[in-house]
Amino acid sequence: MEDTHGRPGNGWRQVAAGLPPAVRLVWGAGRWWALGLTALAVTAGAVPVANAWLMRTVLNDLAVGAAPAAVLAAAAALAVLGVATAVTTALQVYAEDELGRRVGLHADDRLFTAVNRLPGLGRFEDPAFLDRLRLAADNGGQTPAQVLQAALGLVAGLVTVLGFVGSLVVIHPVLAGVVLLGTLPALWGQLGLSRRRAAMIWRLGPVERRELFYRDLMSSAEAAKEIRLFGLGDMLRGRMLTERRRANDENRRMDRRDMSVQVAAGLLSALISGGGLVWVVLRADAGSGAVGDVALYIAAVGAVQQGMAGMISLLAQAHQRLLLFTHYRDVVAVEPDLAAGTGGAGPLTGRIELRDVWFRYTPDQPWVLRGVDLDIPAGTALGLVGLNGSGKSTLVKLLCRFYDPDRGTIAWDGTDIRDVDPAVLRERIGAVFQDYMTYDMTAAENIGLGDRSRAGDRAAIEAAARRAGVHDAVAALPHGYDTLITRIFYQGDGSEQGVDLSGGQQQRIAIARALLREERDLLILDEPSAGLDAEAEYELHTRLREQRRGRTSLLVSHRLGALRDADRIVVLDGGTIAESGTHGELMAADGVYARLFSIQAEGYRRDEGDREDERRRRDEEAPC
């Protein structure tokens, strides 16, 4: 249950709703460990009560001059209980840790299975979902085991408290009632604090995520160059500390409330226990009670108050944890961000068609695509041109079905791709994205991720690397294709670091990853040569031209010369198709494409002219 701001509710309904799934996680991960812990908890709760009664027996026997054998038997039983306490405590610690590991593994498996079931990108570009996912990851694996530990602690505490309350009843029933009633204000205060703390953790989610962002930037190898060049370190450190101070202020206020409740509860407990002790001592002195009753009272009232305080604390912690567990339950049960298509997509033999496609990322943002109509016949190459923000990358996302259009349809050989299972559709697509990934893995793994069915086929991986023009660079690495292409991990046995590749080499690795999917029907190349020099770009496009010959491909680039040989070029402007045709037709039309191409060509000519003037000047200045 959430309020209108997406924060978790604070009532017992959320706690009650979270308890069954938490129990199921524990039961599924380690039922025998849970049962064993339950038995240990009951034993741990009973031992202090037995210990107090044996102590009472020893004192009373000594007071009345009982036989030495009886006194020694009771003392021996006390020693046995001491050993049992030590063994029980050690077993509990080990069992709790082991169960925690098992539950954490089981919970993380369920959480990220649910995350991987999300077929689109919408959730991952939603800040509220990212905050919820972080809290789910932080609390999902810990909460079930901690709730079980709290429940077992409550069981042990309840056994202890009931045993000692019975002891107080033996001394005097009213005394037992007063001691128990004195714990109720602490219970009320702690539950209120747990609700406040759970709400605070949700409020601090964005604050802590921003703090982590600045912290990661300052320790990032990728950002280190710019941070030092532009002198950004102090600014980022200041922003990180500002977010930390905001979080600290919130936590400080909560700690002060906690301290106030603790002090008030402690004073009340001290007054009750002190007053009761005076009464019991006076009663024993007057001959109305036994000497052992004084020892029993001291043990009982301390145990009841400590036991109740412990139970209240455990209950409050479980309450808070179950409130935070709401995030885990919400993520695990999150609805897919795309409608689940169940149909298939066969080999592309006809065309991909976009009909009156409109799209915007959220209802309060402007339209990114507005009424786009587009055909991509099978076996042809379509070039996509446009200024930044014109909708090119968004169109790529729609073709991969990371999002669905708000209006209109995209059809694969006449079948609306909304009716196709996204995983099946993507099996027919290979792509290099503008924001490509370099994984902190070996070079072979980086390429093999493009087609998991061929990840172990070294010949296929090397062939893809050759087509991307990166084979020689990879083969020259210290461990060839088995070299880690990252410096944040150690290679193999930890004796040496991995290596960093240049930006252009990383881009070629990403291209090789896409080319490993050579049997796919649609190849999408979104700015595949943006990080390459002119010679490397020319070489790459020559290789790619051979690779996509006779295949359906979508080419997106700001470098218009790379698109000249496309069968058709489409110009996006403001989310609509402004022009469409071959390179020659668009140049003859003298529109947006011709203007952009001429600007780039003039830049190249100017650069070449400047170089020619410099050569001429040097020749003239050279001595005869």
Image (tube, helix red, strand yellow):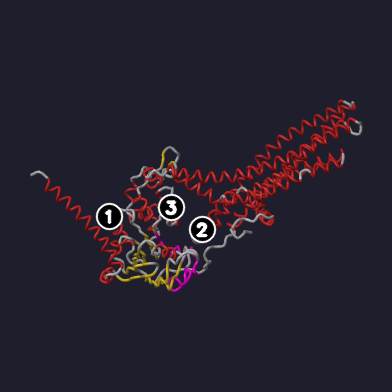
Nearest to the observer: residue 228 or residue 520: 228
Direction from residue 345 to residue 251 in the image, left or right: right
Label placed on residue 179: none
Mark 3 residue crowding within 10 angstroms, few (<14) / some (14–19) / many (20+): few
| 59 over 111 or under it: above or below | above
Amino acid type at image mark 2:
Asp
Q: Residue at x 29, y 64 (%)?
A: 596
Q: Position of residue 118 (x, y in %)?
A: 52, 60
The magenta-colored residue range is 405-431
Amino acid type at image mark 3:
Gly
**Which of the two discs, 2 and 1, labels the residue nearer the N terminus?**
2
Give the quadrant of the C terminus: top left
**Which of the two discs, 1 and 3, labels the residue nearer the N terminus?**
3
Q: Residue at x 77, y 30 (%)?
A: 79
Q: Position of residue 13 (x, y in %)?
A: 69, 57
Q: Which residue is mark 2?
A: 126
Check if residue 419 falls in the magenta segment. Answer: yes
State the image quarter where residue 132 is shown. Answer: bottom right
Residue 289 seen by the camera: yes
Q: Which residue is mark 3?
A: 456
State how far apart marks 1 and 3 are (Cα): 34 Å
**How many marks on residues?**
3
Q: Which residue is mark 1?
A: 534
Amino acid type at image mark 1:
Ala
